[in-house]
Image (cartoon, rainbow, N blue to C red):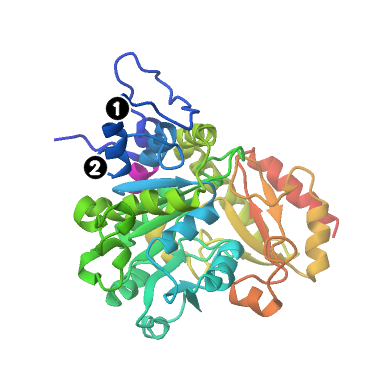
Amino acid sequence: MKKKFKTATLCVQAGWKPKNGDPRVLPIVQSTTFKYDNTEEMADLFDLKKEGYFYTRLQNPTNDAVAQKIAALEGGVGAMLTSSGQAANFYAVFNICEAGDHIVTSNEIYGGTYNLFGVTLKKLGIDCTFVNPDASEEEISKAFQPNTKALFGETISNPGCKVLDIEKYARIAHAHGVPLIIDNTFPTPINCRPFEWGADIVTHSTTKYMDGHATQVGGCIVDSGNFDWDSHSYKYPGLTTPDESYHGLTYTKAFGKMAYTTKLVAQLMRDLGSIPSPHNSFLLNLGLETLHLRVARHCENAMKVAEFLSQDDRVAWVNYSGLKDHPDHALAQKYLPNGSCGVLAFGLKGDRETAIRFMDSLRLICIVTHVADARSCVLHPASHTHRQLSDEQLREAGVAPDLIRLSVGIEDVEDILDDLRQALDQL
């Protein structure tokens, strides 16, 4: 029986399996093309009759090794890297949706994803209904239509830090015969593995904790292999009926549990691109090797920061599910018993200008668009990432005008607290 390694071991050793004489460290295969000795071998690759490499837009050894590592961490059967987290969420939905289809999603999601689903997908003929994640199963079910193809949510919402009830969402999705897609960027598989709670597909912005050092932009889609596409074949003809671009091949018949992932690579990546460079994947792999160490420190520091802010009279509210009085604390204990992430949201007593003045007074903690890397950073979503949204849309997305998103890094926590304290003293 093959030994099942623990998460920390998978972070370090999964994906790249060097053979005798191979480099111990994952190599960067910085090549667009791969040589073959005869035409037939190349033809078999193009027809998906054999596995192998012929053009990096579809597959590359460096990219594939990192994708396999993330699949192992999440407990999935297959994965594909993309050039960004946005691309990952787009591909995850577009792989099973086409013009005339519909999806349902939590309204507490990242602003870029909110815009992707609510604006851009509509231009492609895919409609979207946003729902309050706290609504009852019956109320959320009312948002489903005969042409609904997926339910989407974030394990921990960005930037509101709301914890999703994954089991509830999985029940709703499966009752309507559709897969549940979960963006698991903030907790990472170190703190939550959504497949264990009923999710079917997981996405990541690998730009965040997985990289951990703000050196590359990337995304990943992981398939559990658990959703039975053939049982709902009328909903998913792209997977269950012949693909004429591959001589009538049917993905579910030809690839079984790997059908969804194979279609991602063979059809969407073939036609749309959005691949990461092998060098970016190499950098991502370096981050993954220490993911299990860094996430624990992020959570430890964030908990101390959340407690500090919650006890300061100048702070109006703090959103961090690790706090015992947080509305989502019970959900966090269920889904995230080892900690949530290093990101928290809070508001100051005052107005929008108060938040801006506080942020401008920080010295160690930098104002950046990024989040979830080794360095502490801060952002005012209403002024930055979510500035395209109206006040009503901001509220629908769980973003208050005074919300400050603080990404607590892995520096010494006393230095982080000192910086917050001196900035508060200048209000």
Residue 202 drawn above or below residue 109: above
Q: Residue furthest left?
A: 1
The residue to which callout 2 is attached is: 49
Q: Residue 84: percent from the left, percent from the top? A: 54, 49
Q: Residue furthest top?
A: 21
Q: Quadrant of the C terminus?
A: bottom right
Q: Residue 32: percent from the left, percent from the top? A: 48, 32
Give the structural element (helix, strand or loop) at label 1: loop
Q: Is residue 133 left or right of residue 21?
A: right
Determine crowd level at label 2: few under 14, some 14-19, many 20+ residues with C-alpha closer than 10 A: few
Residue 159 drawn above or below residue 221: below
Give the structural element (helix, strand or loop) at label 2: loop
Residue 70, located in which quarter of the rendered image? top left
Q: Which residues are magenta?
A: 70-74
* Closer to the camera in the image, 250 or 147: 250
Q: Residue at x 83, y 66 (%)?
A: 353
Does the magenta run of residues contain 75?
no
Q: Is residue 141 left or right of residue 314?
A: left
The residue to which callout 1 is attached is: 38
Residue 409, located in which quarter of the rendered image? top right
Q: Residue at x 60, y 62 (%)?
A: 112
Residue 129 drawn above or below residue 314: below
Residue 129 drawn above or below residue 62: below
